[in-house]
Image (cartoon, rainbow, N blue to C red):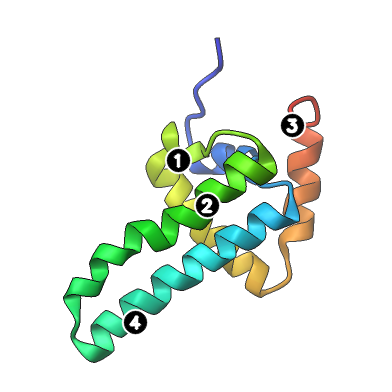
Amino acid sequence: MERRLSSFEEFWPYYVAQHAHPANRALHFVGTSLVLAIVAAVVTLGTPLWLVLVPLAGYGPVWIGHLFVEKNRPASLKYPLWSLRGDFRMYRLMWMAQMEPELARARSLYAAEA
C-alpha cells in the first residue's frame, strides 16, 4: 500500500518526479499560461462567461502530458490542492529557469519510480 504524503514540502519532490519529461512540463506551462490569460481577460474585459473555459484550458494540456507523454496518472487525482499549488510553483520555477535542481532532487528521491 502506498504511503500518504503529509505535507506540501514532502509532496513537492513527488510532484516534480511525476513531471520528469520536458514535454509534460511544457504542456503544464501552456495550460497554466492559458488559465492565467483567461482570468486576465475576464478581469480586464469583464467577460465572466469565459471562466467556463478554465477547466478545459488548464486540464486539457495537463492530461495530454500525463497520459501520452509521461504515461502516469496526474497527482491531482490524489492530492488536488497540493497539485494546484505545485503547478504554480513549477510554473514560476520554469519562468525563472530554476527547475533543474528540483528535478535532480526528485530523481534522487524517486529513482525507482522514474
The relative height of residue 5 versus residue 59 in the rendered view (above or below) is above
Which kind of residue does numbered mark 1 sit on? Ser
* Viewer-side label of 3, 1: 1
Q: Name the residue under label 2.
A: 62
Residue shown at the point (39%, 41%) measured from the top left: 80
Looking at the rendered structure, which numbered label has been put on residue 76? 1
Dot 3 surroundings within 10 Å: few (below 14), some, or many (20 or more)? some
The relative height of residue 15 versus residue 26 in the rendered view (above or below) is above
Mark 1 residue element? helix
* Viewer-side label of 3, 4: 4
Q: Earlier in the sequence, mark 1 or mark 2?
A: 2
**Residue 48 in the image, given as x and y percentages of width and height:** 18, 75
Please name whichever residue, 76 or 60, is drawn nearer the observer in this view of the structure: 60
Residue shown at the point (56%, 58%) measured from the top left: 28
Q: Mark 3 points at which residue?
A: 110
Residue 52 is left or right of residue 101, and the answer is left
Mark 4 residue element? helix
Measured Cα–Cα span from mark 2 to mark 3: 21 Å
Whether residues under marks 1 and 4 lie with C-beta atoms below 8 angstroms apart, the answer is no
Measured Cα–Cα span from mark 1 to mark 4: 24 Å
Picture quadrant of residue 98 = bottom right
Which residue is farthest top? 1
Please name whichever residue, 37 or 99, is drawn nearer the observer in this view of the structure: 37
Dot 1 surroundings within 10 Å: few (below 14), some, or many (20 or more)? some
**Residue 9 in the image, given as x and y percentages of width and height:** 56, 43
Picture quadrant of residue 36 = bottom left
* Viewer-side label of 2, 3: 2
The relative height of residue 80 versus residue 31 in the rendered view (above or below) is above
